[in-house]
Amino acid sequence: MSKDRIAGAERRRLYVVGGLCALGAGIGLAKYLTSQPQPPAGNPLSVDFGDLPPGKLRTVDWNGRTVWILRRSADDIASLAGYESELTDPASEQSLQPAACRNPHRSLRPEVFVAIGQCTHQGCPPALRSGVGNRGEFLCPCHTSKFDLAGRVFRAGPAPANLVIPEYRMEGDSRVIIGET
Ligand code: FES
């Protein structure tokens, strides 16, 4: 077989593999969204985070689900811009959150981030890593999906959508009621 024919065959093989990967990702995302059409709600849990310093994360159990409360610092908030092209769903159009949280910081208040602490790939618990480059992130140890401090997923990993935000409301400056609007 000539070199040109081999190169052509290799190119076609790469197109097919690329197409299958894109199809798989699309199916995964569609399945994820149709299986979870609404942000989780109910059985409210009241959490006081008044003693949580900026940049720190609190983890609570809400009906058997891990929920994070991250008090974002001014630097954390400022760092949530400028890399939108690296994100799968920067405007959270294909991700699950209350309507009031569909904004760049994905929260009711910029300084408080509330999310389900479960990767949208296969459900592993991501970990907060501070000061990676010039911004913090959540890294999932299972297949290295990464999320920014608003839970927006980076394209490089297999997770199909941003972290899920449950229904919640704020009460005063330092109390969140998870599961209730
Ligand atoms: S479960 Fe998080 S990347 Fe696979």
Image (cartoon, rainbow, N blue to C red):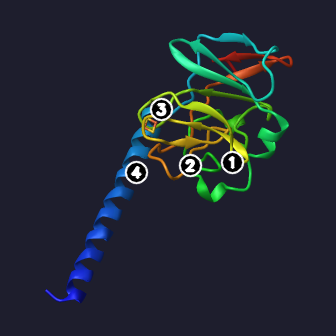
Judging from the image, what secondary structure is the residue with disc 3 in?
loop
Q: In this rendering, would 144 be left or right of 79?
A: left
Amino acid at circle 2 = Phe
- Which badge, 1 or 2, comes first in the chain's sequence? 1
Q: Which mark is residue 52?
A: none
Q: Which numbered disc, 4 or 1, marks the residue closer to the eye?
A: 1
Name the residue: 34% across, 63% down: 19
Q: Is residue 70 above or below residue 64?
A: below
For disc 3, the neighbor class at 10 Å (few under 14, some 14 to 19, many from 20) is few
Does the closest atom of ligand 1 sit within 8 Å of the Cβ of label 3? no
Nearer-the-camera pick, 8 or 177: 8
What residue is pinned by disc 1?
A: 133
| Separation of residues labelled 4 and 1 (CA atoms) | 28 Å
Mark 3 in CB contact with mark 4 (< 8 angstroms): no
Does the closest atom of ligand 1 sit within 8 Å of the Cβ of label 4? no
Q: Quadrant of residue 115?
A: top right
| Separation of residues labelled 3 and 1 (CA atoms) | 33 Å
| Separation of residues labelled 2 and 4 (CA atoms) | 14 Å
Q: In this rendering, would 118 be left or right of 21?
A: right
Q: Which mark is residue 36?
A: 3
- Which badge, 4 or 1, comes first in the chain's sequence? 4
